[in-house]
Image (cartoon, grey):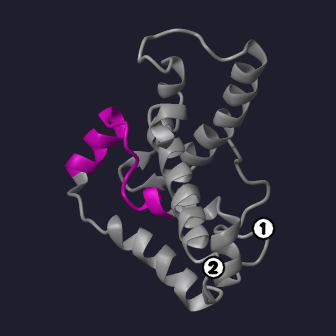
């Protein structure tokens, strides 16, 4: 869902035609907020080098949106049941992290940094979760730390 509102998807209208359908002020605000995400990811590095946050921007936006929307859906699902526990919230975020468990050989890592629009898998965890206030609350991450920075990148 969030790919429909990333740096590329936002350029398509509801009929899937490339057409500018956002107001100029909305585009400017989105681009400003998206640069926060690009800057965040450009600070991530592995031994092979730094992530190019402009190259990975669409995926980064989608991952941040995916965590935000799926956590909201979990909470909505439990809206009429007993409150979801902190441990259950932690399991949600742990499962997000486990999705991206992988190993990549160093030569492939370097190639992917140059050509792949996806960031290295560990940053598909660290990036979105560090921008989630719900994650920070679930794990009591102190304000101003790596996993609870201030300010956060907030697109929507």
**Looking at the rendering, which quadrant does residue 20 occupy?**
top right
- Image spot of residue 104 (x, y percent): 23, 58
Q: Looking at the image, is 138 positioned above or below residue 10?
A: below
**Residue 113 is covered by the magenta coloring:** yes
Name the N-terminal-most of marks 1 and 2. Answer: 2
- Label 2: how many Cα within 10 Å (few below 14, some 14–19, many 20+): few
Query: Which residue position holds label 2?
Result: 80
**Residue 122 is covered by the magenta coloring:** yes
SS at circle 1: loop
Q: Looking at the image, is 147 positioned above or below residue 59?
A: below
Q: Which residues are magenta?
A: 107-125
Query: Which residue position holds label 1?
Result: 144
SS at circle 2: loop
- Of 9 and 104, which appears nearest the observer? 9
Q: Is residue 84 visible?
A: yes
Q: Looking at the image, is 68 positioned above or below residue 80?
A: above
Q: Residue at x 74, y 13 (%)?
A: 24
Q: Residue furthest top?
A: 19
- Image spot of residue 111 (x, y percent): 26, 39
Q: Looking at the image, is 66 positioned above or below residue 17?
A: below
How many labels were placed on the picture?
2
Q: Residue at x 58, y 77 (%)?
A: 78
Q: Residue at x 68, y 74 (%)?
A: 136
- Of 87 and 21, which appears nearest the observer? 21
- Image spot of residue 16 (x, y percent): 41, 18
Horizontal relation, residue 29 to residue 92: left or right: right
- Of 83 and 114, which appears nearest the observer? 83
């Amino acid at each position: 869902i969030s790919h429909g509102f990333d740096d590329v998807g936002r350029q398509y209208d509801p009929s899937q035609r490339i057409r500018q359908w956002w107001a100029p002020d909305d585009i400017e605000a989105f681009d400003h907020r998206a640069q926060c995400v690009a800057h965040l990811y450009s600070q991530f590095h592995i031994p092979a080098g730094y992530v190019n946050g402009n190259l990975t921007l669409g995926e980064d936006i989608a991952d941040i949106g995916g965590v935000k929307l799926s956590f909201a859906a979990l909470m909505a699902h439990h809206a009429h049941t007993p409150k979801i526990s902190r441990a259950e919230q932690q399991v949600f975020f742990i499962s997000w992290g486990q999705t991206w468990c992988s190993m990549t050989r160093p030569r492939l890592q370097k190639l992917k940094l140059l050509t792949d629009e996806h960031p290295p898998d560990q940053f598909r965890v660290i990036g979105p979760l560090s921008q989630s206030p719900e994650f920070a609350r679930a794990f009591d991450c102190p304000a101003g730390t790596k996993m609870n920075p201030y300010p956060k990148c907030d697109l929507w």
